[in-house]
Image (cartoon, rainbow, N blue to C red):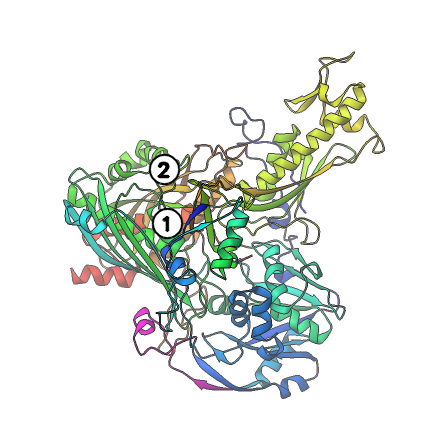
Amino acid sequence: MAKVVLPRQLADELFGGRETVEVSARTLYAVVQALEALGPGFEARAGHALAMAVDGVLAEDWATPVGLDSEVLVVSRVAGGQAKP
Amino acid sequence: MNAPTGKLETPPASGYRIIGTRPVRPDGVDKVTGKAIYSPDFVAPGMLHGAILRSPHAHARIRAIDTSAAAALPGVKAVITGADFPDDESIIARDKSREMLNIARHCMALDKVLFDGHAVAAVAATTPEIAAAALALIRVDYDVLKPVMTFAEALAPDAPLLHEGYIGRGMDRTQARPSNIAAVTGHSRGDAAAALAGAEVVVERTFRTAPVHQGYIEPHACVAQWNADGQAQVWASSQGHFMIRGMVGPILGIPLADVRVVPLEIGGGFGGKTRVFLEPVALVLSRKAGRPVRLAMTRSEVFRASGPAPGSETRIRMGASADGKIVGMELDLTLTSGAYPHDESGGSLMSATLPYRIENFTCSGKAVMVNMTTTFAYRAPSTPQSSFAVESALDEIALKLGMDPLELRIRNAARPGDPGYYGLPHGEVGFLETLEAAKAHPHWSAPLAEGTSRGVAAGAWGNYGGPSSAEVSVAEDGTVIVSEGSPDIGGSRASMAMMAAETLGVPYEQVRVVIPDTNAIGYTMMTGGSRTTFATGRAVIEAAQAVIGQLKARAALIWGVEPAEVDWRDGAAWCGSGDNAGESLSLKAIVTKTSVYASQPLAAAGTVMAQGYLPGVGVHICDLTVDPDTGVTAITRYTAFQDAGTAIHPAYVEGQIQGGSVQGIGWALNEEYVWNAAGQMDNAGFLDYRIPVCSDLPMIEAVIVEKPNPAHPFGVKGVGEAGIVPPLGAIGNAVSRAIGQRMTELPLSPPRVHAAIAAG
């Protein structure tokens, strides 16, 4: 199971305060789907306001592989003009 | 669109033929001869002229709108209100969030106006004069409410709520009560309180900045056409025509393939053209009138109803050891959200802390809704505000410790591998090199003239990569066409042509770049986060490399060998076997030696999700004088240093650094939204909203530092935004040193500086 670490505010808002969750996923895409199931609204947020790092490396492409023991860190995204799309 | 012309003016950078040179910009001739078509210039056959009625009240309920007299006026072809837009539920259902609904309601109010200038109705008529006359005939019955204009008013326990029932993003919905807080964010590492308790020196201050506008010269404008068959077209300048498509589609329920957005020349954006303000309104008018409709904002409308940068209040506590090591920091940032929820505090906190190694910090941020137009991105969104606090505190620590302020920053500079805000290690960030360049520059060691003060500050912006599309094709005569999905805002036609030419081994003048409409190229994220040269550049290079594969195959055909026997180097195909072994063919030679029927067309697409972006970092030195009798500040010398990775076209890079510097100088010295007691903007024009002009400033010397990005084939990092971050601190520090007291509120306008001097 991959370990996902969430920002406190996002955890409070969407995940009942859980800052760490474990998901079964082989790609970042699957991580996003698993988190959407746990915290509806996550996927829409992830697309334009969040970034994710797999094992310490920022990975914008959701096709990025995720290992069984991977740690996925969810962070705010920095980009000019943050509104989607 | 616009052919590049002219010869290379400077020798190429080391190892490259074209990268690092300064060819003539491809859009220059059209722009200086008035032929370039900006949004307000575009004309469609049968076009109507639209106009928008805007609220004079900052906060009011709309009891009723009577448009009957306007609709009856001869020449009026359509009148609309918020009721002509799709209902809330359908927009939310299409968007799966409330974000597009908020954008729609910002474009046109439904039952409540939330800022001075909020649109309440619109007309389309055969002439602008008839449209204006029709607006005067519309009757709006308002129930005027108390405006909420300040953080204190908005956060008071009994504050009127702009959005009843709204609970801010990042707040626990089971605990929080509805409020005017749009969002909260934050992050911490180590134990800041304990570290500050043990610090040799501690600075604690609260800094404030006013909302400011991007000040682009071209106002928002568009022409839109929405036909009875459901297909729509929009002609507009923006920072991303796919952004326009992606917003009007879900707002109005139009399938995206039915919305064709054609990019026009842009007269400045700086983050302010990354959302729609007029396009949905023009489309609804067009649908009702059955004809294309133009809408264009006046300057007053731009100030009152587009998306300026947030005002801010930043409380900082920063502590350092006796030898100048920053041991801890607490940073609490509040930003103006404006009428609808918009939060930039997360990126602001991340970028303000980016330049330094700080082991113990607690950062918190929030955005607060008030009755002004919704704030939005402005070049390094909201980082100048928080960085002003950080850089001012650093300056005060340097004074307390008797340290050189540049040495203090070098002492604490983040290096590659150091943990960033979230603990992720920095890549090849060039902050130390940029600081060293500033230290070695003659400006830093130049003696100060009497009455002159010097300030220094640094700043960073995280930058971005993301999705981009491009296509490269070779014409029958060997010239090259690049199509790219990013509008040309800061010179991307030149930089894309240069990267394609460098990759293909052809002259720059042989490459033409076009920016097709949304139905003619793959999705490309809008220009923001200083991403275009990095991300779209990679798409262009990828497409050019695919074309090289096709060229090798065609060269193999000519030589009668297998494609695997052909190598590509130094801009030419080289034969590796057979009778022609050792011979080479240039791109042009390959193309002209073969018929178009000889093989597949020489054309390929490049699509990327560009990763590996690195921050932009800058250091600015400012010399200035302060007139003690008037409080007027005059900048006498200004030098800006910035790490560009590799500068593809150094003149454009220098322009970005200079432009960012000047906008930051305006932010620091003069610019601010001024409200009256009713919440109306009192300075909605360039006569009263004072942006710097050339006669106000000395030449801004731009110094490019180049520490290449390993994740880009040519080393690009992105340079569009970091230049606006340091000026607030550099000028604040110089003025504070000049008058002997710490200035904590911007702008440092003559009345404010004079009052500080008088107060002693």
Q: Position of residue B692 (x, y in %)?
A: 41, 55
Residue B146 falls within the magenta-colored stretch: yes
Residue beneath the point at 28% across and 45% down: B455
**10 Å crowding of disc 2: few (<14), some (14-19), many (20+):** many
Q: Chain of mark 2?
A: B
Q: Amino acid at mark 1?
A: Met
Give left or right: position of B732 versus B495.
left
Say which label, 2 or 1, has the lower sequence index.
1
Give left or right: position of B283 versus B114.
right
Q: Chain of mark 1?
A: B
Image quadrant holding the C terminus of chain B, namely bottom left
| Residue B431 tag number | 2
B554 vs B123, nearest the viewer: B554
Quickly name the residue at label 1.
B350
Give left or right: position of B182 versus B529.
left
- The quarter holding residue B182 reads bottom left
Relative to A17, residue B508 above or below = above
Residue B299 falls within the magenta-colored stretch: no
Do the residues marked 2 and 1 share a common chain?
A: yes
Q: Main secondary structure of the magenta part?
A: loop
Q: Position of residue B494 (x, y in %)?
A: 59, 40
Q: Amino acid at mark 2?
A: Phe
Secondary element type, mark 1: helix
